[in-house]
């Protein structure tokens, strides 16, 4: 009788981490669906953005005991923290602007090209230059985005520009997160990414604030505020249980959630072009993640081999 070899931590991903990661990306889908419900129902985009981050800021301040927790207020790189803290709410605003006109499946297809853009920007911004194979995958990913948005046709309009801007802002946000993760506390990174948005969008929110007209709007506002925060906290928890390289591929589960929620709430059905573009973006992103994971594995093996040779 053969005995199965024990699986190492590096080979296996805990089922709990998988479940938490899937839940996190479901929360992000609920956030976008709630925002679409509100902005298509007459609520001002910037007011919805402000409420979303204001609720998160208050809850995080309470949960992390902001009145006495120095880690929450710590800033080693203030300029980059401020820039990063403004990028996420800006990305959210452009995303919500696009959601007034585009299907959930269309917006998420473009936003999930962010890892592809990160791979392209990692060279000049982080010194992590992509090789020929990764550049090929990056170009394929951009083709997928073009298939979804179809520039040069009647489909491509200002909403397409909004979601492209949101995707670029989110990509730079991810780059800065990687850059700051080594020097800033996790508490400050998640707190400042909403606090600066609250401050920056407050004047617009006051000017455009409107009492919800439908009972469902109250529920949507609460979901918009809590779903994003819970999603981020769940993602942090999942990352503590498993390597980030193992968590990241589950981000594409959002395409399933968004398509399903879009159909149930808004009767949206993606057309053939959108589905084709989604599949191209997913294939490109998964290849990039697999390639980066393989290169990281080779780097660890090389470092281990070098250390073993040291007398």
Image (tube, helix red, strand yellow):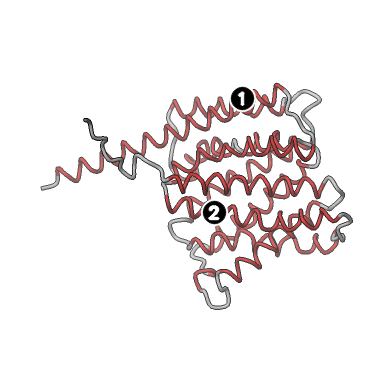
As drawn, the residue found furthest toward the bottom would be 68
Element marked by disc 1: helix
Side of 242 relative to 214 (left or right)? left
As drawn, the residue found furthest toward the front would be 1
Nearer-the-camera pick, 23 or 93: 23
Residue 29 x, y percent position in the rendering: 66, 44
Residue 19 x, y percent position in the rendering: 51, 46
Residue 231 x, y percent position in the rendering: 59, 52
Q: Earlier in the sequence, mark 1 or mark 2?
A: 1
- Near mark 2 (Cα within 10 A), the count class, few <14, some 14-19 or many ≥20, is many
Q: Compared with residue 26, is residue 2 higher up or lower down, i.e. above or below?
A: above
Asked if the residue at tag 2 contacts the one at tag 1, i.e. Cβ–Cβ closer than 8 Å, the answer is no
Nearer-the-camera pick, 13 or 81: 13
Residue 91 x, y percent position in the rendering: 67, 48
Q: Nearer the viewer, mark 1 or mark 2?
A: 2
Determine the image quadrant of residue 281. Answer: top right
At x 77%, y 40%, the residue is: 265
Side of 133 relative to 116 (left or right)? left
As drawn, the residue found furthest toward the left would be 311
Side of 235 relative to 48 (left or right)? left
- Near mark 1 (Cα within 10 A), the count class, few <14, some 14-19 or many ≥20, is some
Determine the image quadrant of residue 164. Answer: top right
Q: Which residue is mark 2?
A: 234
At x 74%, y 40%, the residue is: 162
Q: Compared with residue 303, is residue 290 higher up or lower down, i.e. above or below?
A: above
Distance CA(mark 1)–CA(mark 2): 32 Å
Element marked by disc 2: helix
Q: Which residue is mark 1?
A: 143
Query: Which part of the image, by quadrant, shows the N terminus?
Result: top left
């Amino acid at each position: 009788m053969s005995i199965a070899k024990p699986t190492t931590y590096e080979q296996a991903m805990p089922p709990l981490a998988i479940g938490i990661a899937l839940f996190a990306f479901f929360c992000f889908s609920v956030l976008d669906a709630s925002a679409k419900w509100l902005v298509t129902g007459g609520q001002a985009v910037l007011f919805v953005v402000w409420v979303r981050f204001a609720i998160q800021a208050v809850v995080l301040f309470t949960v992390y005991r902001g009145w006495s927790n120095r880690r929450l207020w710590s800033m080693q790189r203030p300029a980059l923290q401020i820039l990063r803290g403004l990028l996420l709410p800006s990305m959210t605003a452009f995303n919500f602007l696009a959601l007034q006109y585009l299907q959930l499946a269309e917006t998420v297809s473009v936003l999930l090209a962010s890892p592809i853009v990160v791979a392209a920007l990692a060279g000049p911004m982080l010194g992590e230059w992509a090789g020929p194979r990764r550049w090929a995958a990056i170009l394929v990913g951009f083709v997928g985005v073009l298939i979804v948005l179809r520039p040069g046709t009647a489909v491509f309009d200002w909403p397409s520009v909004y979601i492209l801007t949101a995707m670029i802002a989110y990509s730079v946000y991810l780059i800065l997160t990687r850059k700051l993760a080594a020097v800033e506390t996790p508490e400050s990174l998640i707190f400042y990414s909403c606090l600066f948005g609250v401050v920056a969008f407050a004047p617009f929110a006051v000017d455009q604030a409107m009492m919800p007209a439908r009972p469902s709007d109250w529920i949507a506002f609460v979901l918009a505020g809590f779903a994003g925060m819970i999603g981020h906290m769940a993602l942090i928890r999942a990352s503590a249980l498993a390597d980030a390289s193992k968590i990241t591929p589950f981000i594409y589960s959002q395409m399933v959630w968004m398509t399903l929620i879009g159909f149930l709430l808004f009767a949206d059905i993606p057309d053939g072009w959108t589905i084709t573009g989604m599949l191209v973006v997913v294939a490109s992103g998964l290849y990039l993640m697999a390639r980066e994971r393989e290169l990281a594995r080779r780097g660890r093996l090389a470092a281990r081999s070098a250390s073993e040779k040291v007398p």
